[in-house]
Image (cartoon, grey):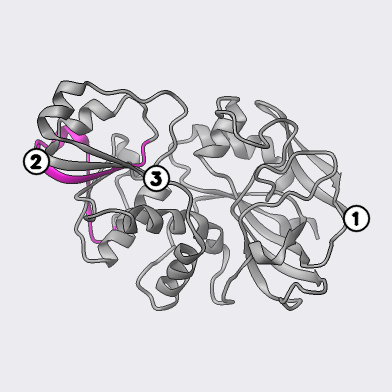
Amino acid sequence: MKTQAILMERPKALKFSALSLVDPKDGDVVVSVRQSGISTGTERLLWSGRMPPFPGMGYPLVPGYETVGEVIETTEGAGIDVGTQVFVPGANCFTEARGLFGGAASQLVVPAKRLHEVPQGIGEEAVLLALAATARHALTGAERLPEVVVGHGVLGRLIARIATAMGAAPLVWETNETRHGDARGYCVVKPEDDDRQDYAAIMDVSGDAQILDTLIGRLAPGGEIALAGFYAERLGFDFPAAFMREARMRIAAEWKPDDMAAVLRMVADGRLALDGLITHRATPENAEAAYRTAFEDPACLKMIFDWRSLS
């Protein structure tokens, strides 16, 4: 069985390619992909060649872990019906490429237990569910909700929206004025326009490895910094300033199934809106230009591929 896929042969070298899929085994399903998204965090690191080593890391690889599609074939023990709309958090089903992420392809073979059923009422915004689950995971792991969120990209906006739905009133710092719009129940300012230095909880999604000293300088005694972004470079900070504040740090990692379930409930009952976050769309054949736009154009919050154009 063949699939059309985006293949990252090496850093900054992409092509649209036909790849062979592994045969489905018991418990697997075949998914016809509808849309997939480009991650401006981890996929930027893959594209640039700056991704730290992980098990399974290497080239050539198929990127993508924000995929939505429809089950078109099922096997014994899969427990999911043909026609079900699903979110696919990546796949490892290619014979000629690594599948460290593996969601950017027209068809995928995936264990059914990895899938998350998506209600039919959610359209292309379903590609955002992994980021929304990541945001929820970062928030529920904290002792207190953030008073400041650093960064107003897609993840920062989702954190701010969910925190607001949970009763918080976070301030968002964003250095790029073009990203100050579309604040939903919270305010966005440049960091230099906020002179407060007694925050009890700050959540950073900037990915800036040099930011810790700045954040520590804004903490109240005993305050917490939550690192919810991904940092390719080594993190460091000035110890005396952190010592005097008895600063605490927490790292929020990968979302869990209960985070996805909670996010789906929030979307269903209207507590979380996913609109306004997808700004750019492309066809998979134009993957190279799409990736450059996603990583280089500050007006691009989320770029998605429409795989239905291939049918």
Q: Quadrant of residue 311?
A: bottom right
For the question of whether residue 103 can be seen, the reply is yes
Q: Which numbered disc flags the more N-terminal residue, 1 or 3?
A: 1
Task: Give the SS element for disc 1.
Answer: loop
Q: Position of residue 151 (x, y in %)?
A: 33, 41
- Residue 198 position in % (x across, y down): 9, 41
Q: Residue furthest right?
A: 1
Tell which of 246 and 300 is nearer to you: 246
Q: Based on the displayed image, in which of its 4 quarters is residue 288 positioned?
A: top right
Q: CA distance from mark 1 to mark 2?
A: 59 Å
105 versus 71 height, above or below: above
Residue 69 versus residue 56: which sits nearer the camera? 56
Per the image, label 3 sits on a secondary structure element best described as loop
User: What residue is pinned by disc 1?
Assistant: 1
Image: 267 above or below 278: below
* Amino acid type of the residue tagged 1 in the rendering: Met
Q: Secondary structure at mark 2?
A: loop
Give the Cα separation between the discs numbered 2 and 3: 25 Å
Q: Is residue 287 magenta?
A: no
The earlier-in-sequence mark between 1 and 2 is 1
Disc 3: which residue: 153
Residue 196 highlighted magenta (yes or no): yes
Q: Which residues lie in the magenta part?
A: 184-206
Q: Amino acid at mark 3?
A: Gly
The residue positioned 55% from the left and 28% from the top of the image is 52
Confirm or deny contact between disc 1 and disc 2 (CB under 8 A): no
Residue named by callout 2: 198
- Quarter holding the N terminus? bottom right
Label 2 crowd bin: few (<14), some (14–19), many (20+), radius 10 Å:
some
